[in-house]
Image: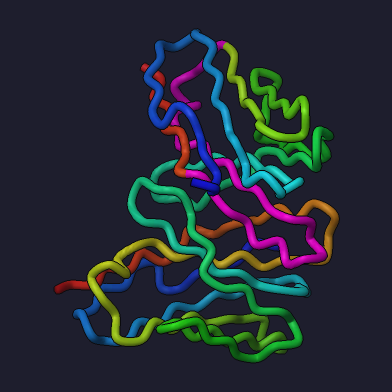
């Protein structure tokens, strides 16, 4: 299935620490996206990494992609309480629809 | 605000009533998606439009659900004869065509509670 599976399901860290979450998928992809969702809100697109890229940075975010292992990781450095949210990965195939299939996500709690 | 907007933000209804939600996408986005999310789960795809054409519907979308995008701009999602199991957050998202990366921009959602 195109669905990504995030791991761990829950993560609790102290402010200032780094947070790493992982995503595994089963099919071949041409890109993978990460989204954040604050409690009770819509999703916010964080970053898209293409299948021919291995690493991408955006501010305090670093995403890696290993297509041979069908996995991706999202690293948030120097975490802040405002990073508390659920994080979802969405593997993308070269299809006509572009629909996203989400897993259960990783719930990150950053304690002040 | 040029983001995706959804109305209403909250809807409480009694079982058996009909409800309609509206989504206004980002103006230059020709793709529009509806998702449903229940507590503790990721969003589940319901349907998508390219311009005014509804090109895919999930099996989750029973015949009580209908979605339209009559002029290729805003979209409505109607649920007829609501059931308690329809209680969820309904999310709308829009994007440019897949060839440009398909980063989807989500609205704030409509939270439906069916009593």
* Residue A101 vertical position relative to residue A35 in the rendered view, above or below: above
Which quadrant would the C terminus of chain B be assigned to in this image? top left
What residue lies at 54% left-to-right and 39% top-to-bottom? B36
Percent position (x, y) of residue A66? 65, 88
Depth check, front residue: A111 or B101: B101
**Res. B12 image quadrant:** top left
Percent position (x, y) of residue A75? 43, 84
* Residue A36 vertical position relative to residue B112 in the rendered view, above or below: below
User: Does residue B5 appear left or right of residue B13 in this picture?
Assistant: right
Give the residue at the far front of this rendering. Answer: B1
What residue lies at 53% left-to-right and 63% top-to-bottom? A45
* Residue A90 vertical position relative to residue B93 in the rendered view, above or below: below
Give the residue at the far top of this rendering. Answer: B16
Tell me, yes or no, whether the highlighted magenta stretch contains residue B98: yes
Percent position (x, y) of residue A73? 52, 82
- Badge count: 0
* Residue A103 vertical position relative to residue A109 in the rendered view, above or below: above
What residue lies at 73% left-to-right and 29% top-to-bottom? B69
**Res. A20 image quadrant:** bottom left
Percent position (x, y) of residue A8? 41, 73
Depth check, front residue: B16 or A51: A51
What residue lies at 50% left-to-right and 52% top-to-bottom? B42
Instruction: Report the span colored magenta.
Output: B81-107
Tell me, yes or no, whether the highlighted magenta stretch contains residue A101: no
Colouring mode (rainbow / by chain / secondary structure / one colour): rainbow
């Amino acid at each position: 299935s195109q669905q990504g599976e995030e791991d761990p399901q829950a993560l609790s860290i102290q402010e200032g620490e780094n947070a790493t979450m992982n995503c595994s998928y089963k099919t071949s992809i041409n890109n993978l996206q990460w989204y954040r969702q604050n409690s009770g809100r819509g999703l916010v697109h964080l970053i898209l990494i293409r299948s021919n890229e291995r690493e991408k940075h955006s501010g305090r975010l670093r995403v890696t992609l290993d297509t041979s292992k069908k996995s991706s990781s999202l690293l948030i450095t120097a975490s802040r309480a405002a990073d508390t949210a659920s994080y979802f990965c969405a593997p993308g195939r070269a299809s006509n629809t572009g629909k996203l299939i989400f897993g259960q996500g990783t719930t990150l709690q950053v304690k002040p | 605000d040029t983001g995706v907007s959804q109305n209403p933000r909250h809807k409480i209804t009694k079982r058996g009533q009909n409800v309609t939600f509206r989504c206004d996408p980002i103006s230059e986005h020709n793709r529009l998606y509806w998702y449903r999310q229940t507590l503790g789960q990721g969003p589940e795809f319901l349907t998508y439009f390219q311009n005014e054409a509804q090109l895919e519907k999930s099996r989750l979308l029973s015949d009580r659900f209908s979605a339209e995008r009559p002029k290729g701009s805003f979209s409505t999602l109607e649920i007829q004869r609501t059931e308690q199991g329809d209680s969820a957050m309904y999310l709308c998202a829009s994007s440019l065509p897949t060839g440009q990366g398909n980063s989807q921009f989500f609205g704030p959602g409509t939270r439906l509670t069916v009593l």
